[in-house]
């Protein structure tokens, strides 16, 4: 019987972006794997699940990764800033990428790349005995090469401070994607919520433009209203919507519709009949 040649699952996002396309992502705050499965069934290229702001545990994230993989959908884990284990653990669980928030300097970016890429790009600690290495079924050297090629890091620029070293950050070998976060950036420039602020718009434009010059991908958050604008700027990874927003709007609509119907009844009150 011929032995199976095991290989890492290719990244749908990287294939699409390397081919000149734009990858569509959505964000999950909820830790339920069924929500991840619903998003994956809907046609997104990628799901972004969060551990920076959300109290999800590793078991919940692992189930979301399995749900996404079942539909050949990539999943990105935004990590909490902690030790190197917080960076590599999602990758070893076979998340397709990690997003690292609040990169504040070139030195910070260098440290993240070093810890998330194998030789010759970095010094990520090697195991191979987890889901991403097919539980030691992928050859050691193949594992290192495939992980560097089919798994990606996303470094978030969401503060004004690292903009002074943007060129040097983007030039780093082993950096896959830079991601502009407008919410925190607006706060950082002293204009919270002013998403039309000239300094914010300039940073958004410059990040996409300079990423292209350095051969790196640019990502950000967007919506149906500014999708074309972001694509024209050069963004090839755009996250649209969030589970909590969708559910919140749906629940509010239900209550609003019922309240409206109650007002139309004689007497204006629902009598339970």
Image (cartoon, rainbow, N blue to C red):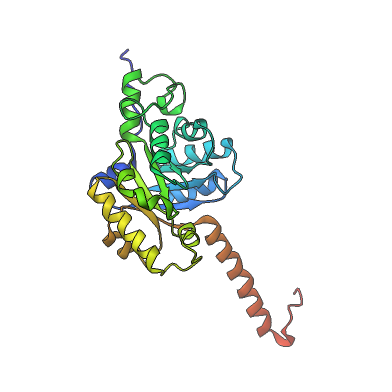
Image x and y of residue 171, in percent: 28, 42
Image x and y of residue 122, in percent: 36, 29
Q: Is residue 263 left or right of residue 15?
A: right
| Residue sitting nearer the eye, 255 or 125 | 125
Taking the image as drawn, is residue 44 in sight?
Answer: no
Image x and y of residue 108, in percent: 43, 40
Query: Does residue 121 sit above or below 210 in this rendering?
Result: above
Q: Quadrant of residue 263?
A: bottom right
Q: Quadrant of residue 270?
A: bottom right
Taking the image as drawn, is residue 254 in sight?
Answer: yes
Q: Residue at x 53, y 61 (%)?
A: 245
Check the image and name the residue furthest to the bottom. 266
Q: Residue at x 47, y 42 (%)?
A: 77
| Residue sitting nearer the eye, 195 or 58 | 195
Query: Does residue 100 sit above or below 202 in this rendering?
Result: above
Check the image and name the residue furthest to the front. 164
| Residue sitting nearer the eye, 180 or 138 | 180
Check the image and name the residue furthest to the right. 271
Q: How many marks?
A: 0
Q: Is residue 257 left or right of residue 147?
A: right
The quarter of the picture where the C terminus appears is bottom right
């Amino acid at each position: 019987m011929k032995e199976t040649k095991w290989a890492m699952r290719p990244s749908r996002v990287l294939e699409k972006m390397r081919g000149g396309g734009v990858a569509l992502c959505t964000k999950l705050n909820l830790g339920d794997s069924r929500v991840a499965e619903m998003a994956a069934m809907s046609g997104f290229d990628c799901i972004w699940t969060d551990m920076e702001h959300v109290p999800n545990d590793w078991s919940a994230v692992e189930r979301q990764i399995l749900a996404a993989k079942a539909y050949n959908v990539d999943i990105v884990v935004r990590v909490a800033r902690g030790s190197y284990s917080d960076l590599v653990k999602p990758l070893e669980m076979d998340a397709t990428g990690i997003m690292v928030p609040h990169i504040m300097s070139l030195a910070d970016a260098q440290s993240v790349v070093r810890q998330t890429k194998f030789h010759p790009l970095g010094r990520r600690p090697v195991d191979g005995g987890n889901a991403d290495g097919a539980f030691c079924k992928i050859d050691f050297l193949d594992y290192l090469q495939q992980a560097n090629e089919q798994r990606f890091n996303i470094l978030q620029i969401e503060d004004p401070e690292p903009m002074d070293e943007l060129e040097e950050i983007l030039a780093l070998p082993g950096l896959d994607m830079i991601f502009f976060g407008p919410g925190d950036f607006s706060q950082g420039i002293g204009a919270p919520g002013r998403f039309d602020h000239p300094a914010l718009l300039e940073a958004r434009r410059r990040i996409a433009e300079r990423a292209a010059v350095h051969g790196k991908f640019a990502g950000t958050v967007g919506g149906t209203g500014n999708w074309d604008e972001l694509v024209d700027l050069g963004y090839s990874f755009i996250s649209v919507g969030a589970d909590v927003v969708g559910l919140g709007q749906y629940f509010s609509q239900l209550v609003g519709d019922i309240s409206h119907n109650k007002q139309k009844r004689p007497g204006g009150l629902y009598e339970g009949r």
